[in-house]
């Protein structure tokens, strides 16, 4: 479905597919199961539908994860398990989608992590050297410097870890969970943290100096939020998953994603037909106008099909007599 959607010409009006946004939304479940948690951020019991949405509006991958985990743990896994023709190399997220080890691992795997960080001015920018001072932006930096020697010492370990993840020898989720323990005795954690400090500092400086980048991050993350509302609208039977089996819960989230992608594909085809019809009548069609049309349209969708009320009596009278064996069940 994703590959077919990607072959539509209209998708090039919305984006090039190189950028994706990741975010989670709570889905309610029963309380007594392995994934259900109560979290102050969301309220109630449930799990998170963690989705990767392309800048062309289509969903690439989804997880169903506990509410209490740091979402950044799953941000790279969705990119690695995405088997479609759309292979993004830039990923946007919110504050939950980043941490120092994630910045480091994403860079080693070739992904450009550019999150929308809340209260970014509270973060520390690390100096490349303790003696380095800047004329105009020195106030952005703390007194700590990046330990390049530590990164150089564990360069082989960092590269081996990234290669193992690429070759599916180890899960990025398992690794990031362990690197999230902030253990000062964990040498691999310290190396990823130090690399992440360098990458995040560069990312913060890019974020501050590039208005177009800030606009792109906001635009793509907003599309993720819009997909969440669209998928919620398409979920039949309410947003409560009435089952305790984690596999069943995962299927519900993935089937909901598949249904949303099918509807998005259909709407994109309708937009294509409408644009072609307008052009065939001799009216100009501005590509910039097409780029502003979102495929998350609901007012043209009949979720339960067409119901036709026909009050005309049937031509033949219905059979009312049940006679499975003559003169046995019902006497004449």
Image (cartoon, rainbow, N blue to C red):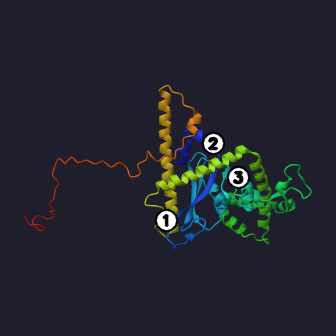
* Residue placed furthest toward the left: 332
Name which of mark 2 and mark 3 comes first in the sequence: 2
Q: Secondary structure at mark 2?
A: loop
Query: Would you place residue 37 above or below residue 72 in this image?
Result: below
Q: CA distance from mark 3 to mark 1?
A: 33 Å
Instruction: Please give the residue where the numbered disc 3 appears in the rendered image.
Output: 114
Q: Does residue 229 appear left or right of residue 130 in this picture?
A: left
Q: Give residue 325's quadrant in the image.
A: bottom left
Name which of mark 3 and mark 1 comes first in the sequence: 3
Q: CA distance from mark 1 to mark 2?
A: 34 Å
Instruction: Give the crowd class for mark 1: few <14, some 14-19, many >=20 residues within 10 Å.
Output: few
* Residue at the image point whose x is 78% and y is 50% from the top: 205
In this rendered view, identify the residue nearer to me: 138 or 226.
Answer: 138
Query: Would you place residue 329 above or below residue 223 in this image?
Result: below
Query: Would you place residue 307 above or below residue 195 in this image?
Result: above
Res. 102 in view: yes
């Amino acid at each position: 479905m994703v590959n077919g959607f990607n072959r539509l010409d209209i998708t090039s009006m919305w984006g090039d597919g190189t950028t994706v946004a990741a975010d989670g939304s709570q889905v309610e479940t029963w309380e007594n199961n392995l994934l259900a948690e109560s979290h102050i951020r969301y309220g109630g019991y449930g799990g998170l539908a963690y989705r990767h949405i392309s800048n062309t509006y289509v969903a690439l991958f989804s997880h169903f994860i506990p509410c209490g985990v740091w979402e950044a743990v799953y941000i790279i896994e969705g990119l690695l398990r995405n088997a479609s023709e759309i292979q993004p190399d830039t990923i946007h997220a919110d504050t939950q989608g980043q941490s120092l080890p994630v910045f480091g691992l994403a860079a080693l795997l070739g992904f450009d992590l550019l999150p929308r960080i809340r209260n970014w001015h509270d973060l520390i920018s690390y100096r490349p050297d303790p003696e380095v001072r800047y004329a105009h932006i020195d106030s952005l930096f703390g007194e700590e410097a990046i330990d390049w020697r530590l990164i150089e010492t564990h360069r082989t370990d960092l590269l081996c870890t990234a290669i193992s993840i690429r070759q599916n020898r180890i899960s990025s989720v398992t690794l990031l969970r362990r690197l999230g323990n902030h253990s000062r005795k964990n040498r691999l954690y310290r190396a990823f943290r130090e690399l992440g400090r360098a990458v995040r500092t560069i990312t913060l400086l890019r974020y501050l100096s590039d208005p177009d980048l800030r606009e792109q991050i906001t635009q793509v993350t907003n599309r993720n939020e819009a997909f969440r509302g669209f998928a919620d609208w398409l979920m039949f039977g309410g947003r409560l998953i009435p089952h305790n089996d984690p596999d069943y819960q995962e299927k519900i989230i993935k089937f909901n994603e598949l249904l949303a992608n099918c509807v998005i594909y259909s709407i994109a085809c309708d937009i294509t037909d409408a644009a072609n019809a307008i052009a065939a009548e001799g009216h100009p069609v501005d590509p910039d106008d097409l780029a502003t049309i979102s495929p998350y349209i609901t007012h043209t969708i009949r979720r339960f099909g067409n119901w036709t009320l026909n009050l005309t009596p049937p031509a033949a009278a219905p059979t009312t007599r049940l006679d499975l064996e003559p003169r046995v069940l019902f006497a004449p």
